[in-house]
Amino acid sequence: MSKNIKQNLGFFTLFLCILITLFFLGSIIYFISVRGFRVISWEFLTQGPRMGMTQGGIAPVIVGTLYLTLGAIIFALPLGLACAIYLCEYSPKGLAVNVIRISINNLAGVPSVVFGLFGLAIFVNFFGFGVSILSGSLTLGILILPLIISSTQEALLAVPVSIREASLSLGATRWETIKNIVLPTALPGILTGVILSIGRVAGETAPILFTAAAFYTRGYPKSVFSEVMALPYHIYALMTEGTHPAKQTAIAYGCSLVLLLMVLLISAAAIFIRQRQRGASGQ
Amino acid sequence: MKDKIYKWVFTVLAFSSLVFLVGIVLVLFKEGFPIFQKVNPIKFLFGKGWYPTYSPPEFGILPLILASVWVTAGATLVCVPLGVGSALYLHELSGHRQRAILKPVIEILASIPSVVYGFFGVVIVTPFLQNTFNLPTGLCALNASLVLGIMATPTVCSLADDALNYVPRTFREASFAVGANRWQTLTQVVIPAAGSGISTAIILGMSRAIGETMTVLMVAGGSAVIPHSFLEPVRPMTAAIAAEMGEAPMGGTHYHALFAIALILFMITFIFNIIAEMISRRFRIKLGLSG
């Protein structure tokens, strides 16, 4: 009897745990959605800030985030693909592979603000790119490299060995097999990883603090060497700088909702694609 | 011939992660080490005063380290019960259909950006704490712990759930066969078997909390004094770097001091990750999974 009471108590506690977790996470989304929707309008999404950040919209801020995200992907995708292809298709099992695997794991664990300092020292100062889209994109690119590598690896490993062997037995070289058979088959999986990385990059703030972001720029960025406004940094700056806290908080709610919607929709898309694939491959 | 060229290209590019990791270490050492020519390393680590802009300045980072430790400990107290508890619920109690919804929802929630958590902390949690505890400011170590804990919960939950799923069915069936009920099986067979996998989840969650920047920068309060209570404002290491780097003159003592803090932070997370890796490797061997 007491055995079953214990079980009921235990199960009730577990139920409470997930309830509290969902309550907190739900309330974040609830508050930001409700208060953010009051601010968002067509004007808010399509115009630049006016009157010292107290009026107008956030169009250049959204555009800035898109540039940074695009730049980071352009930089990290080829590198990540190459690395994953090497590890899955060419790797002679041995020291080199272990070294690479360990460095990927550790790179994934480096705090984001440390990436920011690295970007500041190397891209901003050493290469002289200054505080710019270029410096920020490169810094963000390094940050998501491990994510792209591990998701690409997962996609490549899911390609059955038999397909590869069939291609090789027909006389195709290793590279022809990769290019014509393995990559097309793994493409949806690779895309999922890329989409997830986009979601991650769009919301990162600490790496762009000293490498790319500015609280206010006039109009849209003109080249890869200009500083940009970016959504996540904009939220932070609205809460800590400026002279009209009340009006700025309202705009920050709008920015948070736009960022939240962007990131959640992007990662939801990626996760659903991945689930369908796992379902399809019978896992 | 062409094949060989491709192989070489891939091999060279594959080492990029290593290059970046080594590059980060080199930069941190190069830019952080000069501080130790001006300030004794012992004094730097254990000095109780962080006044980088006073004259003469003082560079003791003990208050920053302790702030990081307090906030991370607080966050762990929040995210471990919630994260592991939720994972156990997902594993043991949620039906097939419920799980198919809850698992992806939690994965999606794990992608909420940290600046959004920070913003939530400032606009919602801060006034709540201020009124509840009658504080001069709601920006304090407790606030940072709560927000950081909630933020790390989905990560811990997701990883712990993976660990639980690795436990072979046969373990559970054997336990049922000798007359244990579900709760006894869960606490005495499944949790011990998944124990090291769950510890890996917890360590990675803590590692994330200690390196997290934007949330603590926004809600921890920012005062660089040795913390005496969770209701006081504090300034963790990451917040100090993010808040002060913009004003520190390049190549000055303050600049080097901030890089030295980043170096210490890097070492801490590095050690956390190595430990997590070692535990998870043992875990896989114990359950007979391939490396």
Image (spheres, coloured by chain):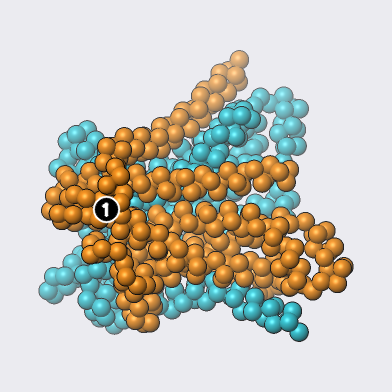
B20 relative to B241 in the view: left or right:
right
Residue A177: name its quadrant.
bottom right
Query: Which residue occupies the extreme right position in the image?
Result: A169
Which percent across, then down, holds residue B79? 44, 42
Residue A164 vertical placement versus A92 (above, below): above
Could you say which chain is coloured orange in the image? A
Name the residue: 55% across, 74% down: B16
Is residue B267 visible in the rendered image? The answer is no
Name the residue: 59% across, 56% down: A191
In the figure, the shade used to draw chain B is cyan
Which percent across, then down, holds residue B49? 20, 64
A76 relative to A153 in the view: left or right:
left
Q: Amino acid at mark 1?
A: Gln
Label 1 element class: loop
Between B285 and A20, the residue placed more toward the observer is A20
- Mark 1 chain: A
Name the residue: 70% across, 65% down: A88
Between A121 and B173, the residue placed more toward the observer is A121
Name the residue: 22% across, 43% down: A250
Which residue is labeled 1 in the image? A47
Residue A157 vertical placement versus A43 (above, below): below
Residue B87 vertical placement versus A93 (above, below): above
Count of marks overlaid on the render: 1
A2 relative to B68 in the view: left or right:
right
Which percent across, then down, holds residue B191? 60, 39
